[in-house]
Image (cartoon, helix red, strand yellow):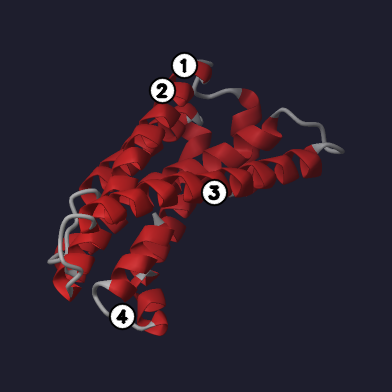
Amino acid sequence: MFFFLTQFVQNILGFSPLVAGIAFLPMTAVIVLTTQVISRLIGRFGLRPFVTIGPLLVAAGLFWLAQINANTSYLGGLVGPMLLLALGLGNIFVPLTLMAVAGAGSQESGLASALLNVGQQIGGSIGIALLGTIAATTTKNQLATVAPTHAAVNQALAAGYGSGCGVAVVIALLGFVIAAVVFTGHPSSQPAHIAAENAA
């Protein structure tokens, strides 16, 4: 999502790299604020509500982004889904980290945290490779039958980014299903409660 949005705001909206970075600040701020709130609520409600609702919010934001086209503006078409995605990601980050280290002993918590980070990096790399290929293929197919004018290229690029986000919706929903099936324990389990208090 960050990859596609960065490409979109620079290639289609014409933002400079600096302005593109600034454009992500609202999303970053919401992620930070959400994680702070969630870290305090986990002790009361447990991990499961947040780790299940997070992927649904992410899927909704990605579905919204999948509707982008060459005429989509930053304020009118990007800020809304970005903030929705930020809420979803904020719901996921803290519970996921706590679940990764809650069952590990004090001598293994560093290893558990490192494995989580490695998993995220590998998942991100695979995601960019897969969704980037889908986006590039969609763009190529769109340009195969039209003259490569500036408007046509922008529309084809937007269609590619949209198709990538569309496939990402399926991945986010898969994350929801996994979270709903795997994390069926009592919402206020003792390890999660202690870990949340330590995190807060």
**Residue type (three-letter) at the residue carrying disc 2:** Val
- Name the residue that disc number 3 marks: 124
Q: Nearer the viewer, mark 4 or mark 2?
A: 4
Dot 2: within a 10 Å radius of its alpha carbon, few (fewer than 14), some, or many (20 or more) residues?
some
Dot 1: within a 10 Å radius of its alpha carbon, few (fewer than 14), some, or many (20 or more) residues?
few
Residue at 74% x, 38% y is: 112
Spot occupied by residue 27 in the image (x, y as percentages of width and height): 36, 62
Q: Secondary structure at mark 1?
A: helix
- Name the residue that disc number 2 marks: 177
- Name the residue that disc number 1 marks: 181
Callout 2–callout 1 Cβ contact below 8 Å: yes
Residue 92 visible somewhere in the drawing: yes
Figure check: 13 above or below 76: below
**Residue type (three-letter) at the residue carrying disc 3:** Gly
Residue at 62% x, 38% y is: 98
Spot occupied by residue 8 in the image (x, y as percentages of width and height): 30, 66
Q: On the image, which quarter does residue 20 sit in?
A: bottom left
Figure check: 2 above or below 100: below
Left or right relative to 26: residue 65? left
- Name the residue that disc number 4 marks: 15
Callout 1–callout 4 Cβ contact below 8 Å: no
Left or right relative to 65: residue 44? right
Q: CA distance from mark 4 to mark 2?
A: 37 Å
Left or right relative to 76: residue 87? right
Q: CA distance from mark 3 to mark 4?
A: 24 Å
**Residue type (three-letter) at the residue carrying disc 4:** Phe
